[in-house]
Image: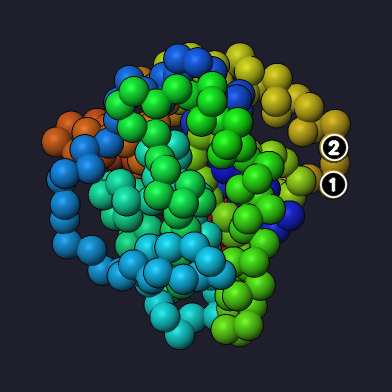
Amino acid sequence: MAGAFLYPGLLFLASIATVSSHSQCLDNPPDLTARRHEAGTVVDDLAGFKAYVTGAAHSHRAIVLASDIFGFEAPLLRKIADKIGETGYHVVVPDFFNGQPVTDGTNLTEWIKLHSPVKAANHAKPIFAALKKERKSVIGVGGYCWGEIKRPIEILGAQYDVTARPKLVYQFVQALRQRNQICYYAKIFPGVKHGFACRYNDTNPFEVKTAEQALVLMLDWFGK
């Protein structure tokens, strides 16, 4: 799940809980060899980070996407970024893991200690500052599988997510209802599991349709 990063208009996908020693994340890793045409480019130094940058370069409205544990190079993640960019946003996908995403054999417990949501939230601040210098307003942060909550939030969960089960999402929503100052929206998608919005099988019509529905809700949330 993405970190709140102290900015409004957030999208939290899939998981609310901290990744454990074995995570459902590992059940459907992305195919990093499946390259596709990319509308954006990789920049080497965005406030000290590599980043995939796409969308409307001259737009004053920026979206920052935080990747899941597999990093910013995942083809489907960049495809999502491109689709958001096509709607008029300037989109940035930073490499918050500094070239150290989860790979085969990674010890997740140790990896999380080095790449916690709190650290990523702090690392994001200079990125926001750099975008501000370019006269861009960061109106939203979208992310997958990790984070904190301090601003308006949209939660798109999965029926078969064993990390953040629907029951946990409902409990989470109940807690949000007690905090009237935080605007939120939550939806559980039926028939899908953890990672459904960014690691779907693009040859499966149902999974593609569900991911596209999640993307529409993301864009509607940012628009709001």
Q: Residues within 10 Å of mark 1 (few under 14, many from 20)?
A: few
Query: Where residue 202 sits in the image (x, y, percent)?
Result: 19, 39
Query: Is residue 116 depicted above or below 93 in this figure?
Result: above
Query: Is residue 114 depicted above or below 192 in this figure?
Result: below
Of 27 and 7, nearer the camera is 27
Q: Is residue 28 left or right of residue 14?
A: left
The residue at the point 41 percent across, 19 percent down is: 24
Q: Is residue 100 left or right of residue 27?
A: right
The residue at the point 58 percent across, 75 percent down is: 131
> What mark, if any, has residue 120 been given in the picture?
none
Query: Where residue 207 sits in the image (x, y, percent)?
Result: 27, 32
Specify the amino acid type for callout 1: Gln
Q: Residues within 10 Å of mark 2 (few under 14, many from 20)?
A: few
Q: Quadrant of the N terminus?
A: top right
| The quadrant where residue 224 appears | bottom right
The residue at the point 50 percent across, 15 percent down is: 21
The residue at the point 68 percent across, 42 percent down is: 118
Q: Are marks 1 and 2 in contact (CB under 8 Å)?
A: yes
Residue located beneath label 2 in the image:
179
Query: Where residue 193 sits in the image (x, y, percent)?
Result: 39, 22
Specify the amino acid type for callout 2: Arg
Query: Where residue 91 sits in the image (x, y, percent)?
Result: 45, 66
| Secondary structure of the residue carrying numbered label 2 | loop
Viewer can see residue 84: no
Q: Is residue 204 left or right of residue 5?
A: left
Residue located beneath label 1 in the image:
181
Number of numbered discs present? 2
